Image (cartoon, grey):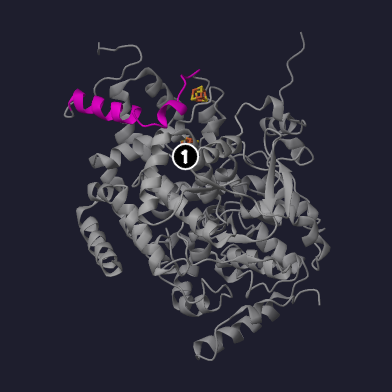
Amino acid sequence: MSAPTIIPIVDNIMQKKSRSVRRDPQNAPTHDIREELFELEARGELIVQRVPEPYVEVQTKYGRTKKIPIGKTWHHKSCGQCGHIPGYTASIFWLHRQFGIDHIDPTDQTSCTGWNYYASGTSNPVAQLAVMSRNFAAAHQTGYYPLIHCGTSFGHYKECREEIVHHADYRAEVRRVLAKLGKPLVVPEEIVHYSEWVHVMRDRIAERQVVDFSDITATVHTACHYHKIVVEDAIYDPDIFGGQRTATVTATMQALGAEVPDYSTWFDCCGFGFRHVLVQRDFTRSFAVQRKIQVMKEEVDPDLVVTHDTGCVTTLDKSQFAAKAHDFKVGIPVLSDAQVAALAMGAHPFRVLQLHWHTSDWRPLMEKLGIDWEKYWDEFQEDLAAIRSGEKTLTWEDADAVVLGV
Amino acid sequence: MPEWTLGKVTNKYPDVPYEEKERLFLETKADPRYPGYIYGCYECGICVSACPSARFYDYSPRVIAQAMAREDVERFYEIMVEDICNCAQCFSCVRCPRQNNPGGLVTIIREMAVRNGVQEARDVLQGYTRVIYKVMLKGNQVSPDMLQPDFFPDWGPWVAGFKGNMKAWRQAIPVDTLRGVTDAAWRTDDETLRELYTIWFETGNIDIIQEVDEGLYDLLVDVMEEELEEWE
Ligand code: SF4
Ligand code: SF4
């Protein structure tokens, strides 16, 4: 008898993941939550906010369609993005402004507070549902549709929607609390993540691309809370990794001309850990470096990592510094898909992308893309000098212009 | 030979009466989400292979699913005081072929531990209370002024540099709601924050904070009540 062939573990994973899967919504293992929402609306239990037209239809994990609105969006910002990597948020708005898309950046918005809930357990489901519903009621009041910037808010709200639909006592309690605020219980027809908007806009973004990405190899890290909480509701496409991995971010990078190779720890989390990233980062650093950055480096040696969540950008970016002391193979810049899309369309690397908030070295990437980053850094230093002397603050008037490739 | 019962651990916490452990277990089991998170367990270990915490800690989502499915009260208590803090809440374990959600079980057990003032849960959160303060009062988990070199030494010299630049850098963001804001992630309306405070009071969330840290609770209640009184 001949000896069995032993396939190395990485090859084994890659082989399995290269098989194409097609899914039939008729055989979906879940009920369509939207039908249940409409039934609850018909019974007068809640209001379902409809996706405004125009929208683009995409496929989710079990082959069902999901509507992604193009405009009239109410931007549910992310506290991790806005607080620690503001170029992520600025890039989303820059893209909207470039396309002249009607949107609102509300001040009547709190974070979902889900980061705290997953970090500490110092809340309860009704409080979490009420925070979500307060935000959704605020969006509904404006007539604009919520676009969720944060991966955790997106996943958390998908989970909260399940709880609202499946537990009548939660619904009753949340309605009671909202009544104190003079607000109705509103749930949007679709929970939409900003990277899904970037996904459906990718061809329009590519049409206006001024920076060439064809020499760039990018690895994608998909945020856990995007596709693991309520697994069904994430975009899949049979043409992207055979429909076995989510299509968001990867399809955007491919539309921009980058090569996006698969790697064996694609499914792994970034190590964020919610509480860990704030107060127990030995775990976060170890996981981010040993299971993500180093594996990417060894298997495909990418020019950058692209992801679509606050925590993932921060974790994968900031964890690389300490690892250098241990001679780990690190040194890959980490950006969000919106930052990359804005860069591809010629946005200012500092006024819009705010690269100075990132710690992993982005300079080699800029140089490979043919961007004279020092010129833009000097411009930004002038902005800062004027700000420090009280002459100005930076506004969209300074940041709207396409500066690359002109 | 030590006494050994199949599937049961010995009583590692004899100072805590069995009745108390059982009460905590039953409270966990009574959570409306619980039946949707555990359907039995094949012991296949798929959840463990996907779990980041299992790689770095003596921690196993399989053990959690098993203990809960077997209703092993002693093991449940051990998990509550020793294990749940290790979970990264990534939900990679939902790959479970039995449709279990071990991460979801941890979410519930954590909430029970905190709500019941279990000492180990309080200890774990000691360095974390400044975040609770921020999230309760500002509705944001993090803000630029929390990026302090003392708290993030492993992020390198960038953090110290950032401290000197924070004010100017925040003025150099084109987004209106972010520009110049350093004590929150973005500018939030006062009325929105009062609505948030109302939610914390009406849902009993603030009482949970009392179980974690009495001093923090007093401070939060003072600030929020004053704001709400002004509003009325
Ligand atoms: S949620 Fe917790 S138990 Fe599940 S895979 Fe993540 S770290 Fe492991
Ligand atoms: S994957 Fe599911 S069935 Fe398998 S060990 Fe984990 S909890 Fe049990």
Is ligand 1 closer than 8 angstroms to the Cβ of mark 1?
no
Please tell me which residue is depicted at 80% across the width and 65% down the height of the picture. A209
Q: Where's residue A149, x and y in %?
A: 57, 56
Visible residue check, residue A302: no
Q: Where's residue A2, x and y in %?
A: 77, 12
Choose between A91 and A106: the one closer to the eye.
A106
Q: Is residue A37 above or below residue A23?
A: below
Please tell me which residue is depicted at 20% across the width and 28% down the height of the picture. B20
Please tell me which residue is depicted at 55% across the width and 33% down the height of the picture. B50
Dot 1: chain letter: A
Q: Where's residue B219, x and y in %?
A: 23, 62
Choose between B167 and B198: the one closer to the eye.
B198
Visible residue check, residue A380: yes
Quadrant that contains the C terminus of chain B: bottom left
Q: Where's residue B138, x and y in %?
A: 38, 63
Q: Quadrant of residue A337?
A: bottom right
- The residue pinned by badge 1 equals A164
> Disc 1 residue type?
Ile
Q: Is residue B208 above or below residue B97?
A: below
Q: Is residue A379 above or below residue A254?
A: below
Q: Which residues are magenta?
A: B17-42
